[in-house]
């Protein structure tokens, strides 16, 4: 997709030397990691409604849930897998036979199986040696492959694992039949350069597609996912609105728009549906999206300051990176204490009040003052306020 940003000379030149993929798969885990957001629990019907929208928007894979976790979870996953959606339906399992059996029973097309590899998890959680972990992951992958199911293997806490051991674990996973490997930055400790380094190192030994799963503990989930793509990752795990454990996961809308608009990489996502999808997920999960959330937030394309509103009214791209319609969002000129004459004139015109004909220049100055004084009290100036002020002032003459 050609865009204003993408055709920018600085960006273009900075990306020129990179060997970027043409396509990146979006593996959506809103219904699994996203549902692990504290306080979120979706009913089977809600999960199905979200899955249908995710498929419609064009994700490559949906991680529908963690089958072993509950009966309701299995019911939802089975139903989602039976819908014949236009994307891969995946179930999560630990590298444990019982988990794998229930995932198989849900008729998913792929199983995302994981075991932790980092020293912390080995010692305090699993109480297993390095060798035992490799033995376990190999057995699990071979078992899933015996059932003819696609396997994505994750070394949980990969980014805090010794590199040589991590490579060994992934090499064993591939030899056992893993179709893709996924690199979870489980507690979000990577920075873009470390992610690039790690993926480049893994690429030397791993010949199946590499995926990443970045948590957002330092607010770098999207940047780290993108850095991984720069280094050759072909799939990114995302969640709608960046939901997920703790500070969440890389947000789908931010990842997709960056890859698409800045790098020109096709994710297959119908971007004009992003804002609707975000609202749907917010509605079902009960997690409000912050107004300044990039891409889909209520304020992502809102302008209050006089200078910005003036610029946007002259040419929207002066203060917007992309047209909001591309992501199904909308531009708003918000009136408040920072507003300038251009924005207020434009708002008046929207409600049928023309400066110079309906109101004089003096009356207009008074309208401006009254709008600013509402803004000064920390209040939002609504269309109704503007209408009332204009009526009040014109009535007096
Ligand atoms: O963050 C993580 O490590 C996970 C695993 C299950 C892959 O979500
Ligand atoms: Zn996770």
Image (spheres, grey):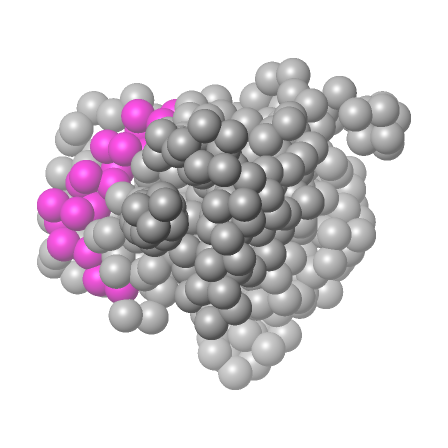
Magenta-colored stretch includes residue 107: no
Image spot of residue 343 (x, y percent):
55, 40
| Quadrant of the rendering where the C terminus is positioned | top left
Q: Is residue 110 above or below residue 293?
A: above
Which is the main secondary structure of the residues drawn in magenta? Answer: helix
In the picture, residue 3 is in which quadrant? top right
The one of 323 and 295 positioned closer to us in this rendering: 323
Image spot of residue 25 (x, y percent):
51, 30
Q: Is residue 40 above or below residue 366?
A: below
Res 48 visible:
yes
Give the residue drawn at x 58%, y 67%. 217
The one of 294 and 41 positioned closer to us in this rendering: 294
* Residue stretch rendered in magenta on the structure: 40-60
| Quadrant of the rendering where the N terminus is positioned | top right
Magenta-colored stretch includes residue 50: yes
Q: Is residue 363 above or below residue 136?
A: above
Res 202 visible:
no
Give the residue drawn at x 53%, y 57%. 369
Image spot of residue 265 (x, y percent):
63, 24
Q: Is residue 245 above or below residue 80?
A: below
Image spot of residue 104 (x, y percent):
24, 42
In the picture, residue 131 is in which quadrant? bottom right
């Amino acid at each position: 997709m050609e865009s204003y940003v993408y055709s920018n000379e600085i960006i273009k030149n900075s990306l020129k030397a990179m060997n970027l993929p043409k396509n990146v798969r979006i593996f959506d885990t809103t219904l699994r990691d996203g549902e692990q957001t504290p306080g979120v629990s979706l009913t089977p019907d809600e999960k199905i409604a979200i899955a249908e929208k995710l498929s419609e928007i064009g994700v490559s894979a949906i991680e529908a849930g963690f089958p072993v976790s509950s009966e309701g979870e299995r019911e939802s996953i089975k139903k989602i897998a039976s819908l014949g959606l236009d994307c891969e339906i995946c179930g999560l399992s630990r590298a444990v036979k019982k988990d794998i059996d229930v995932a198989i029973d849900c008729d998913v097309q792929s199983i995302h199986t994981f075991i932790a590899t980092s020293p912390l998890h080995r010692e305090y959680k699993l109480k297993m040696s390095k060798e035992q972990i490799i033995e376990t992951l190999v057995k699990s992958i071979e078992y899933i492959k015996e059932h003819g199911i696609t396997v994505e293997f994750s070394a949980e806490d990969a980014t805090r694992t010794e590199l040589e051991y991590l490579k060994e674990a992934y090499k064993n996973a591939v030899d056992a039949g893993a179709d893709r490997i996924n690199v979870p930055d489980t507690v979000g400790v990577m920075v873009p350069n470390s992610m690039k380094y790690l993926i480049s190192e893994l690429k030397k030994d791993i010949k199946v597609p590499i995926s990443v799963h970045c948590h957002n503990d330092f607010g770098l989930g999207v940047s780290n996912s993108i850095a991984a793509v720069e280094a050759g990752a072909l799939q990114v795990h995302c969640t709608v609105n960046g939901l997920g454990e703790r500070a969440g996961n890389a947000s789908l809308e931010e990842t997709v728009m960056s890859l698409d608009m800045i790098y020109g990489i096709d994710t297959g996502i119908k971007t004009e549906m992003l804002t609707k999808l975000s609202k749907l997920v917010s509605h079902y999960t009960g997690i409000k999206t912050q107004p300044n959330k990039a891409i889909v937030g209520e304020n992502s394309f809102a302008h209050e300051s006089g200078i910005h509103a003036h610029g946007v009214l002259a040419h929207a791209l002066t203060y917007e990176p992309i047209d909001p319609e591309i992501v199904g969002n909308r531009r708003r000129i918000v009136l408040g204490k920072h507003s300038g004459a251009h924005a207020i004139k434009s708002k008046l015109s929207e409600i049928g009040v023309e400066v110079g004909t309906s109101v004089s220049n003096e009356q207009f100055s008074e309208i401006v003052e009254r709008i600013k004084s509402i803004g000064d009290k920390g209040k939002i100036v609504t269309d109704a306020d503007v209408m009332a002020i204009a009526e009040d002032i014109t009535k007096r003459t």
